[in-house]
Image (cartoon, rainbow, N blue to C red):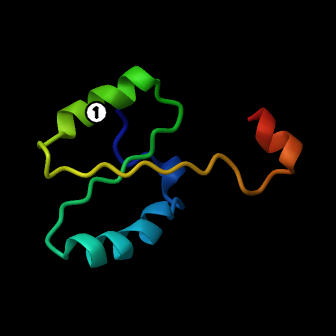
Amino acid sequence: MIVNDPTHTQEHAVEVQIPFLQTVLGPDLTIVPLNAGDATPQEVGDVLRALWGGPETVIVISSDLSHYHPHEVARAI
């Protein structure tokens, strides 16, 4: 796991999710934003298992593979 990877400093997806989650779940929630990048499913699963806190834990997974490339290129990625 890489913490604070500078290649993701411009990532803003969590900014879209936080207001919604705070409205629905309240302001006292703990948020752990993760960017999986090229992590394997096993690595992602390992991190999620480490963070799992029981039935009160909510995991939100979102994907946005590409929104800058032409359709054909985005599908190939």
Q: Indicate left or right for 5 with 38 as reference.
A: left
Q: Residue at x 37, y 49 (%)?
A: 4
Badge 1: how crowded within 10 Å, few (<14), some, or many (20+)?
few
Q: Residue at x 34, y 53 (%)?
A: 33
Q: Percent position (x, y) of residue 68?
A: 77, 56
Task: Reply above or below: 28 against 59.
Answer: below
Q: Residue at x 28, y 73 (%)?
A: 24
**Placement of the C terminus among the 4 image quadrants:** top right
Q: Indicate left or right for 48 with 54 as reference.
A: right
Q: Percent position (x, y) of residue 61?
A: 42, 48
Determine the residue located farthest toward the front in the rendered image. Answer: 55
Q: Amino acid at mark 1?
A: Val
Task: Reply above or below: 51 against 58.
Answer: above
Q: Nearer the viewer, residue 25 or 51?
A: 25
**Placement of the N terminus among the 4 image quadrants:** top left
Numbered circles on residues, count: 1
Q: Percent position (x, y) of residue 52?
A: 18, 39
Task: Reply above or below: 44 against 27.
Answer: above
* Residue 31, picture quadrant: bottom left
Residue at the disc numbered 1: 47
User: Quick one: SS at disc 1?
Assistant: helix
Q: Percent position (x, y) of residue 63?
A: 55, 48
Q: Indicate left or right for 71 with 13 as reference.
A: right
* Residue 14, picture quadrant: bottom left
Q: Residue at x 54, y 61 (%)?
A: 10
